[in-house]
Image (spheres, rainbow, N blue to C red):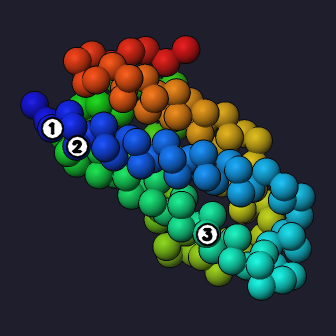
Amino acid sequence: MYDRDLVKEILSQILKALDTVICWFAPVKSLTDLTDSPSGMEKFDAICMQLLAIGEGLKNLDKITNNSLLHQYPEINWKGAKAMRDIISHHYFRILHSFENLSLFCGPHIAGNFCNIGKFTFQFIESKGVQILSTP
């Protein structure tokens, strides 16, 4: 068994970070929106930091729950979400040079996965750890 309060806290942090990433990335239309000004670079760095934190949080959930929680929801691309952390931390400069790479993290198709992760997270938190509700 695992510490459900700790799991809920990590999920709360992930949900907040997901909301932040989606909000910050929404107005971005091209790579130059992020690379052609100091404020754009700050936004890029901030988005990457949140994505890194989400990936790390998901990895921690697996560790804390002994891999018993996330695999119950195979419709969510957990592997890809967790891999964001590794890609950002090990290939940061390559991401910066390609809007297509950044869009893989924040574009419309990943937003769907974020929404699924967010729904799962919210429902788990709302369940007060007694039971995990299925994602809609």
Disc with the residue nearer the chain's start (3 vs 1) = 1
Residue tagged by mark 3?
46
Q: Amino acid at mark 1?
A: Asp
Where in the figure is residue 73, as x and y percent of width and height? 42, 25
Q: Are marks 3 and 1 in contact (CB under 8 Å)?
A: no
Looking at the rendered structure, the kind of residue marked 3 is Ala
Residue at (45%, 60%) from the top-left corner? Answer: 53
Q: Quadrant of the C terminus?
A: top right
Q: Which residue appears at 31% of the width and 44% of the height? A: 9
Compute the Cα span from label 3 to label 1. Answer: 30 Å
Marked residue nearer the N-terminal end (3 or 2): 2
Residue at label 2? 6
Q: Secondary structure at mark 2?
A: helix
- Is residue 47 or residue 71 the one in the foreground? 47
Identify the residue position indicated by label 1 in the image: 3
* Label 1 secondary element: loop
